[in-house]
Image (cartoon, rainbow, N blue to C red):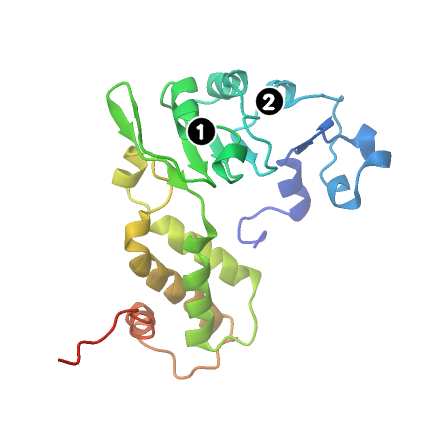
């Protein structure tokens, strides 16, 4: 996966900065850090809070997944917006009470410039006469199609490349119209179409890697995936 992105694991880690309850995770804290945090402990002076970390690191994306509600404050979003024309704000914690910020807060505090995604569902937000539709970052976008792709290809194992293929398949289904509305994922109302395309990409990668056992390879993997999907409705017998 890292080789496909043309970057080493070490270089990728240098781009990721983490913050915990004690502040920015830096090398000077290494003796007190849990083992899984140490690989992300970079050389930097200590910073005690998220706002200070954002000012010091100047990130392009802010990802929250610690379940600390309202940790993306107005000041944090405003600083992110001063650094980036389109700040990426992903408030992934749920339930809603533990979300780092709401969709309305992200759009309002960034003056409508935030690229926003959340773990909790939020209603559309109107800001300056423009309607933004928040994207819910839910693994339900991926796992049905991913599992279907593994099954229809008869893959003997799952590889990182197959996971990446699923992510790319989802991203390819986001249109300029979706992005204009604030959506960073395609609408969930077309999840069957989304899942069929993801399944086809995952299966194709399994065949390309020589890990598929369902032979011969179907000519049209999307149509084959659709034919293998259940339709959860009762037939009419009258």
Q: Circle 1 sits in a helix, a strand or a loop, which is it? A: loop
In this picture, residue 157 sits left or right of residue 129? right
For residue 58, above or below residue 155: above
Considering only order in the chain, which callout, 1 or 2, is on the residue closer to the N terminus? 2
For residue 190, above or below residue 57: below
In this picture, residue 210 sits left or right of residue 66? left
Q: Which residue is drawn at 31% across and 32% down?
A: 124
Pinpoint residue 212: horizontal percent, then vertical percent: 48, 77
Residue 99 visible within the image: no
Pinpoint residue 221: horizontal percent, then vertical percent: 33, 71
Screen quadrant of the C terminus: bottom left
**CA gap, disc 2 and disc 1:** 19 Å
Pinpoint residue 67: horizontal percent, then vertical percent: 59, 36
Q: Circle 2 sits in a helix, a strand or a loop, which is it? A: helix
User: How many numbered discs, if any?
Assistant: 2
In-front residue for pair 168/24: 24
In this picture, residue 226 sits left or right of residue 80? left
In-front residue for pair 106/26: 106
Pinpoint residue 151: horizontal percent, then vertical percent: 45, 74
Screen quadrant of the N terminus: bottom right
> On residue 102, which mark appears?
1
Q: Which residue is drawn at 28% across and 54% down?
A: 190
Q: Residue at x 39, y 25 (%)?
A: 104
Residue 20 visible within the image: yes
Asked which quadrant contains residue 20, the reply is top right
Label 2 crowding class (10 Å Cα cut-off): few <14, some 14-19, many 20+? many
Which residue is the extreme one toward the left? 238
Q: Circle 2 sits on which residue?
A: 54
For residue 163, above or below residue 210: above
């Amino acid at each position: 996966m890292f080789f496909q992105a043309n970057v080493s694991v070490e270089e990728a880690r240098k781009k990721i900065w983490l913050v915990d309850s004690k502040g920015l995770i830096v090398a000077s804290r290494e003796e007190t850090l849990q083992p899984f945090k140490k690989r992300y402990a970079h050389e930097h002076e200590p910073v005690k809070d998220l706002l200070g970390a954002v000012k010091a690191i100047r990130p392009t994306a802010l990802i929250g997944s610690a379940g600390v509600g309202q940790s993306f404050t107005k000041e944090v979003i405003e600083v992110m917006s001063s650094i980036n024309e389109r700040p990426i704000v992903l408030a992934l914690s749920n339930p809603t009470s533990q979300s780092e910020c709401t969709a309305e807060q992200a759009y309002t505090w960034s003056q409508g410039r935030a690229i926003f995604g959340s773990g909790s569902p939020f209603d559309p937000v109107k800001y300056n006469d423009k309607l933004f539709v928040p994207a819910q970052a839910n693994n339900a976008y991926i796992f049905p199609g991913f599992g279907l792709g593994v099954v229809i290809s008869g893959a003997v194992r799952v590889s990182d490349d197959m996971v990446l293929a699923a992510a790319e398949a989802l991203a390819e289904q986001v249109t300029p119209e979706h992005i204009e509305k604030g959506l960073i994922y395609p609408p969930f109302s077309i999840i069957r179409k989304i899942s069929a395309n993801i399944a086809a990409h995952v299966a194709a990668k399994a065949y390309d890697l020589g890990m598929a056992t369902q032979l011969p390879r179907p000519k049209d993997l999307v149509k084959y995936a659709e034919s293998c999907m259940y339709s959860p409705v009762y037939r009419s017998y009258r």
